[in-house]
Image (cartoon, coloured by chain):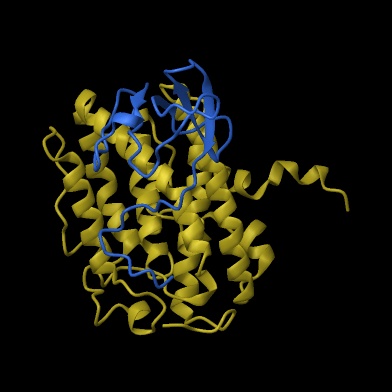
Amino acid sequence: MSAETETSWPEAAVDYVQSIADTKLLLGQRYGEWMLKGPHLEDNISGASNAQDEIGQVRQLFRLLKQQGVDEEWLESERAPEEYANAPTLDEEAENWPTFIVQVALSDRSAWLLLDAIDHDDFTGMVQKMGEDEYFHLEHQDGRLETLAESQPEAVEAALERYFPQILSFIGPATYDEDSDPLVTAGFTDRSAADIRGALHDHYEALFAGTDVSVPPLEDDVPDPEQWDATRRRTDDGHVEAGVVEQLQGVSNQEYVIE
Amino acid sequence: MSSNVSDAGANSTEAVADGSREEEPPFRAACPFCGSEDVELESTFGSEVSKSQYYCNSCHTIFERIKYDGAMPDTGRERDGSR
């Protein structure tokens, strides 16, 4: 499809982009939390760099959402924790380094695949630039996962078992194929949730081939399509902690605002 | 970590100790001081988000390069160049 720039999107597309943007907002937060705790200096530099990239991408996606009529105050500073539509993988800060790497690797790669699937003129060029950022995020994470698969395979596998079903929920149900995915049929994306799920699974199967790490199977009933909330892209009512939302919204800095 | 960029195979992407990966061609860096291609990738992230850091084995100098060459992450599907 080639819609005109700044035309109205299908309603489902606003939710789709909102969820990608909120996932990137939380990725920025999680990278920031870990940018001084990595095992190597390069991990810390990459954490700081990735956080800046993600927040920069959020600013561009929020700009597009505002063009579609999403309220600016609600978007940036008035939302309750349960109104954020981030991938459930990012609801909580990881408790250790291997868990953090699995958490951000799955989330960042999935957000990229969802972004890459958008076929609309409002995103032309912008997604290319975001992909150039993501190339380095994802290469670094895959390298990290390969070395952790050698040194701490049990920790990597445990994190995959915990987060893989959650990231499938973020991508969407297996029943959303080329003929039934509402975003594909509306012409907003050109790749179905079912296809993206397969691509993600194939990527990690290839990455961990020959290691002691098994990737969880691609379960067609995860998420349950009957329970799946297309707005928050999950099946439960989980959400990020209130304290993190206060940081995202800059609540403690509001006393310094000059009216 | 270090990886010899000039010796990198045509399609190799190999993990090294700290999780960084060898860059693939066309990312062939040359030393801006002596012109040598006998350089090693020291860090995929340099002093700024947009730079990676190299060491020249010829003149023993650290240098940085802007790393955005249009490389995109794999998506598991062919790109048709329409965007």
Q: Quadrant of residue A200?
A: bottom left
Task: Inspect this view and state whether residue A235 appears.
Answer: no
| Vertical order, B77 against B61 (above or below) | below
The residue lying toward the viewer, choosing from B45 and A111, is B45
Q: Which residue, as the protein is rendered here, is positioned at the far top? A: B60
Q: Which chain is yellow?
A: A
| Vertical order, A219 against A149 (above or below) | below
Q: Which residue, as the protein is rendered here, is positioned at the far front? A: B35
Left or right for A244, reference A181: right
Could you tell me residue A41's position as x and y percent? Answer: 47, 22
The residue lying toward the viewer, choosing from A192 and B1, is B1
Q: Residue at x 26, y 49 (%)?
A: A164
Left or right for B63, reference A226: right
Q: Residue at x 30, y 77 (%)?
A: A181
Could you tell me residue A120's position as x and y percent? Answer: 47, 76
Q: Quadrant of residue A131?
A: bottom left
The residue lying toward the viewer, choosing from A100 and A4, is A4
